[in-house]
Image (cartoon, rainbow, N blue to C red):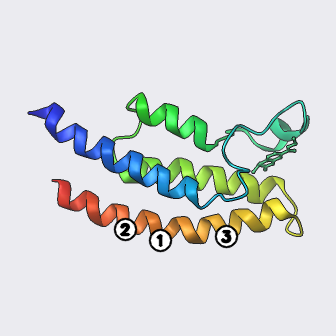
Amino acid sequence: ALEMQLTPMLMLLRSTLDQLQEKDTAHIFGQPVCIKEVPDYLEFISHPMDFSTMRSKLESHFYRSVSDLEADFNLMVSNCLLYNASDTVFHRAALHLRDLGGAVLRHAQRQATNIG
Ligand SMILES: CCOC(=O)c1ccc2c(c1)NC(=O)[C@@H](C)N2
């Protein structure tokens, strides 16, 4: 039945999101960028993204594939690379997360093909 087919994908997406967030050891991607702390952020970034928002979207069934999750992960990394100068800790952390996340996502994509 459909619900049986959807459940494995939800489980895979949760596991993948957990693995991606584990790579954020500085915990700078866990919550939306605070506009009170960074008042000009939305002048540069039109679509903010963070792991807590991704988790809400996942549980609301916005993601139907690993690619859907990957798109928001890439958006989150790209926002950080765009807003933060290249000589900042934030920019360097985004480059590192992009590299570590790529391996996680490639493995998840292979597992997704085994689901059906
Ligand atoms: C309490 C002050 O926090 C921040 O200024 C801050 C906190 C977290 C941030 C961030 C800024 N900028 C970013 O681009 C994303 C990746 N993370």
Q: Which sits earlier in the primary sequence, circle 3 or circle 2?
A: 3
> Between marks 3 and 2, how big is the CA–CA gap?
18 Å
Q: Are the residues flagged by discs 3 and 2 in contact, CB closer than 8 Å?
A: no
Q: Are the residues flagged by discs 2 and 1 in contact, CB closer than 8 Å?
A: yes
Tell which residue pokes out farthest to the left in this image.
Answer: 1
Tell me which corner region of the image, top left, top right, bottom left or bottom right, holds residue 77. bottom right
Secondary structure found at label 1:
helix
Q: Are the residues flagged by discs 1 and 3 in contact, CB closer than 8 Å?
A: no
Secondary structure found at label 3:
helix
Tell me which corner region of the image, top left, top right, bottom left or bottom right, holds residue 93. bottom right
Classify mark 2 as within 8 Å of ligand 1 or not, answering yes or no.
no
> Between marks 1 and 3, how big is the CA–CA gap?
12 Å
Secondary structure found at label 2:
helix
Q: Which residue is mark 2?
A: 107
The residue lying toward the viewer, choosing from 11 and 87, is 11
Residue at the image position 56 percent from the left and 70 percent from the top: 100
Residue 10 picture location, percent across and down: 32, 41
Q: Amino acid at mark 2?
A: His
Any mark on residue 96, and which?
Answer: 3
Asked if residue 101 is positioned above or below residue 69 in the image, the reply reads: below
Residue at the image position 40 percent from the left and 68 percent from the top: 106
Residue 52 picture location, percent across and down: 59, 37
Q: Which residue is mark 1?
A: 103
Any mark on residue 55, and which?
Answer: none
- How crowded is the residue under tag 2: few (<14 C-alpha within 10 Å), some, or many (20+)? few
